[in-house]
Amino acid sequence: MPDDFERMWSDLAPIGRSARTGGYFRQPFLSAERELADWFLEQCVSRGLEVETDAFGNVVAWWRGGGVVSHLRVHEPSEPGPKGDSLPTSAGILTGSHLDSVLDGGAYDGPLGVVSALAAIDELRRRGFLPTRPIGVGVFVEEEGSRFGLACLGSRLATGAMSWESARELSDRDGVRLGDVLEGGSSSLLAGVGTFVELHVEQGRDLVDRAAAVGVASEIWPHGRYRFDFAGQANHAGTTRMVDRKDPMLTYAMTALAANKQARLVDQRATFGRIEVAPNGTNAVPSRVTAWLDARASSDASLGDLVETITRQALERAERDGTSLEVTAESVSASVAFDPALAAAVAADHADGDWPIVPTAAGHDAGILSAAGIPSAMLFVRNPTGISHSPEEHAEVPDCLVGVHALADTLERLAR
């Protein structure tokens, strides 16, 4: 199993990696991410797994317990979805994650869960285990929202949490609509899924502080993405007196500082990580600044209070600056509490004792499936740097192998 994991990881390492920064650019439906998708299908074929796809590019590959099958059936996105004996005959256990990345992201966020899922099936086969319930390995598209702006887009579409009619109008930074990339339609990909278990690199230092290689998720904090449109008056940077300016950049700058202060005061999270400026000239007062706020909090009420306070302070500053502001909630995900009995069962009775159960402020496909009524759990693998969404994101191979064993143990328990 170590050789299996390390070989697969080595295969993925160069795909989509920037020679300049060392980070990854694996945006959905572009060349690097599609190369990873092809790699995944090849791995499934080599293991004799039955592959199903939906109209949105999500994929599930099923192991039904009979060893290596002699054929493969792939449902193309244009087809209505799996029917008849192509669905699990009893509630299946799904694992997996995603293969896309944030812009200039790390190697582990997403792909670690996919590689570990394949390695866990290899491990179960070596043990001679034959599941009485089907085990699937899934890959959801556009989990990060790095191209079309909505996180967990693939799983939202697969669960019906978002309609295709709304999703197809989403566009990337070049103006390409999702409807121009996909034909779309509907999905029955998850119809036979009874439980979802997602393995993920930890995005923080909780496990480092606990000296634990693996942990189990208790909950996902609520989070949202909000677009702040600041408007002012374009003017000459040299000839316009400071007192005469209507500069939206000043309003934005104060808002970014206010967001930082308010989040620190209540120990929550607020980040302006993306900004667009028009006309974006060095010698011009801008006419427009568009900025995106990522806000996260320990409860739904706390998230609402945080965004309301930031917005109020921004509007007050806009009035003083002679500018204007419109705020649009582009996506908001409510808090998710994972089934405590399932989390306890996943965490319990391992060779090294029970794994710790910890919360996370990062969004995941597991949260979308849980909210859709599919019992879900998450395993985290220790990240020694605590850094994520960055080229410095990391996990040590021995910890990754512990994660594979923990996932295999979990799948074995659930699939008996």
Image (spheres, grey):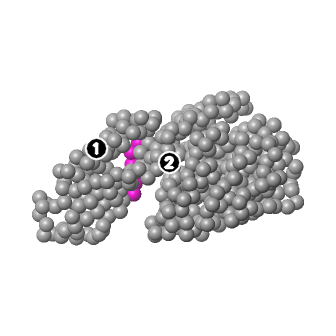
Where disc 1 sits, the SS reads helix
Q: Which residue is mark 2?
A: 387
The answer to whether 143 is drawn above or below residue 76 in the figure is: above
Horizontal arrangement in the rendering, residue 158 relative to residue 325 (left or right): right
Instruction: Determine the residue positioned at 39% across, 45% down.
Output: 270
Q: Quote the CA–CA distance across marks 1 and 2.
A: 32 Å
Q: Which mark is residue 111?
A: none
Horizontal arrangement in the rendering, residue 294 relative to residue 25 (left or right): left
Q: Which mark is residue 312?
A: 1
Instruction: Determine the residue positioned at 25% across, 55% down.
Output: 324
The amino acid marked with disc number 1 is Arg
Instruction: Determine the residue positioned at 51% across, 38% down.
Output: 335
Horizontal arrangement in the rendering, residue 107 relative to residue 244 (left or right): right
Q: Which residues are magenta?
A: 269-274
The answer to whether 306 is drawn above or below residue 85 in the figure is: above
Residue 347 in view (yes/no): no
Where disc 2 sits, the SS reads loop
The answer to whether 267 is drawn above or below residue 310 in the figure is: above
Q: Quadrant of the C terminus?
A: top right
